Image (spheres, rainbow, N blue to C red):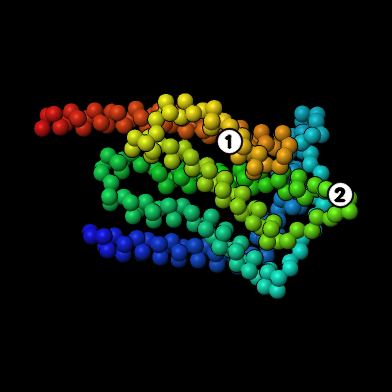
Amino acid sequence: MNFLDHIEELRWHIVRCAIAVMIGSCLVFWKVELIFDRVIMGPAHKDFISYRAFCALGKLLHSDSFCMDDIHMKFQNNAVTGQFMMSLSVSVMLGFVLVFPYILWELWKFIKPALKPTEIKMASGIVFWCSLLFFMGVMFAYFIVAPYTINFFGNYQLSPLFENIITIENYYDTMSNMVIALGVVFELPILVYFLTRIGVLTPAFLKAKRRYAFLILFILSMVIAPPDVFSCLLIFFPLYILFEISVSISARALKARKIREAKEALEQNND
């Protein structure tokens, strides 16, 4: 196909993705009040599952440090159309998360015809693994990071004279940015795998830059987490483990690339 044909093909993939997001958004919007109260506002409730689970873990360890305080903050809407627009935003965001595997599949369908058989074999299961990592990041953010973030900032007071009255837009932006960002960050092993296969990254480079990665991930953890040591480490260790997994994946990808290049060179010599 020529360039315009590729653009036309891409347009239809985008159209199908948009339709999928619209369908997912409609399904969410159907029960948006319940979803907003139980899911989006979940970490703002003192009986949220993560609070109960960590408190139970603390009791098993004979420590009260895992049990978090009740959240003392109120919410408000300060715009005429605020609550309606919020329900639309929540529907679109959760609709996107819901159909994320389908969006990856459409992207894969667009890219696949341009790949060689060996490259297609190399990318076997890419939609499944990308989706799995994305949902792992989303669940980690929602059940681990969000509760500590909301609990800390909800109870933080510069002075007893101040009361935490949060707009629903600010709360939602904090939650959605956190969840989507960590969902994307958890795609790191996939990105490293492909960059290694095309020769951009090597495991030696990643190992040499390990100290910088350590520092960057720690700073990222401090930015995402509330400013206390436990919460920061709670985010840092999974991210660092993700980096070490990426180094291992890079080493395997490099080995596979060298084997492939050796086979291609041998085939050329035979020809």
Q: Nearer the viewer, mark 1 or mark 2?
A: 2
Q: Earlier in the sequence, mark 1 or mark 2?
A: 2
Label 1 sits on residue: 217
**Residue 206 seen in the current view:** yes
- Residue 261 or residue 35, whichever sits in front: 261
Left or right: residue 247 versus residue 75 is: left
Q: Furthest residue to the right?
A: 161
Quadrant hosting residue 264? top left
Question: Where does residue 53 sit, x and y in percent of width and height?
Answer: 72, 40
At 72% from the left and 33% from the top, the residue drawn is 229
Label 2 sits on residue: 159
Relative to residue 107, is residue 52 depicted above or below? Answer: above
Quadrant where the C terminus sits is top left
Question: Where does residue 226 sit, x and y in percent of width and height?
Answer: 71, 42
Amino acid at dot 1: Leu
Question: Where does residue 186 sit, x and y in percent of width and height?
Answer: 52, 42
Amino acid at dot 2: Ser
Looking at the image, do the residues carrying marks 1 and 2 touch, with CB atoms under 8 Å apart? no
At 65% from the left and 53% from the top, the residue drawn is 175
- Residue 30 or residue 141, whichever sits in front: 141
Q: SS at mark 2? A: loop
Quadrant where the N terminus sits is bottom left
- Residue 215 or residue 47, whichever sits in front: 215
Distance Cα–Cα, label 1 vs label 2: 32 Å
